[in-house]
Amino acid sequence: MNPAYERAADERVNYSKSIPFLLMHLAPFAAIWTGAKPIDWLVCFALYFARMFFITAGYHRYFSHRAYKLGRGMQLFMAVGGTMAAQKGPLWWASHHRHHHKFSDQPEDIHSPLRGLWWSHVGWILCNRYQDTDMERIKDFAKYPELRWLNRHYLVPPTVLALVLFAFGGWSMLLIGFFLSTVLTYHCTFFINSLTHLFGRRRYVTTDTSRNSFILAILTLGEGWHNNHHYYQSSVNQGFYWWEVDISYYIVKLFSWVGLASGLRGVPDHVRDGNKLKDGHLDVGMFDAHWAKAMSSLTTARKQTGQFASARLLALEEARRKALEELRTSTRAAAEKIAAMPIEATGDSIPPVA
Ligand SMILES: [Zn+2]
Ligand SMILES: [Zn+2]
């Protein structure tokens, strides 16, 4: 692996702390003994749908990107709904997500697939390093005491949900209705960090490897339009054209019609129609990603031959690496100039705090 993307000592999966997470994956199999009723499957589907909505519309589009406005009561409602998915608190989730956008696919990016597919999917969540919330990055929401409480006691809502389901429908509802739907919500959410940076089509020039995928957009209620999203993060809709199905957006739109949400931010037409790869812009994000991979191969080759190579050969190799890096910087700068991306297309994802 490219040394810049290599993981530090505290970026190894902590298996003992991850036991509850692993057990949640095994729990649904116990339904072999309990059986499962149609109502259990119905609850599984409903809770998958509802919690995916709270994650995408709440944790992601509202708390991470402030793509629309909510009153304080609705804000708390969306936060509690999000914690039901057992993906930690809203401040933790949103602060890490803001970090991802700031450093997308750069060496600092916590969960870039350039650091490994498994790592980007789930490894980063299970290591010790990223357990705390970076309050500096989310101070616009950290000022609310109810959100700070929820962020600390993030296990309370999902535990209550599990107990209510158990009381209502017994073991089978707990195993299928709660655990199976929680695990499905986990992995479909995680796909956005892993698969949407690997599979699908790139429409826009972005400085990362994000892609658009119809299948993932259906599974995640609209989050599969990830290249659109990286291109213009502040928009509440991630599907930019009518055929790009975006269910979370439709629901937030419904909220706005009945006065539960306001200030929905869209994507301006000239931004939506500009900077497309099909118009001949150089794909800066993939250029960087291929470069990172090439550097990685070079490092591996060097490690393999290093023990046999003379000091002089190694010095020559180092000089070549420096020359390549200079070439990369100048090509990249030229490409960026040609692409001439408008400022509003990439920056300013989060409006200034009022
Ligand atoms: Zn985002
Ligand atoms: Zn991304």
Image: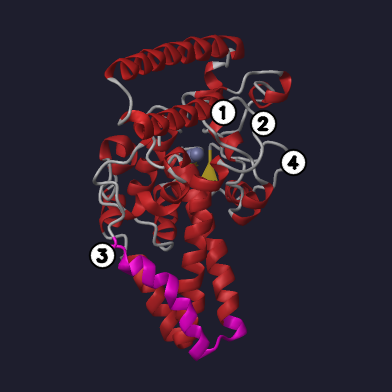
Residue highlighted by disc 3: 16
Quadrant (top left, top right, bottom left, bottom right) of the N terminus:
top left
**Which amino acid does the dot numbered 2 rest on?**
Arg
Against 108, residue 347 (above or below) is above
Q: Is residue 262 left or right of residue 71?
A: right
Of callouts 1 and 4, which one flags the residue occurring earlier in the amino acid sequence? 4
Residue highlighted by disc 4: 242
Determine whether the residue tagged by mark 1 lies in a helix, strand or loop.
helix
**Which amino acid does the dot numbered 1 rest on?**
Met
* Residue pictured at 57% horizontal, 16% vertical: 342
Magenta span main SS: helix
| Residue 203 disc label | 2
Residue highlighted by disc 1: 286
Task: Magenta stretch: give its range.
Answer: 15-39
Of callouts 3 and 4, which one flags the residue occurring earlier in the amino acid sequence? 3
Q: Which-is-in-front pick, marks 3 and 4?
A: 3
Q: How crowded is mark 2: few (under 14 residues within 10 Å), some or many (20 or more)?
A: some
Query: Can you see residue 341?
Result: yes
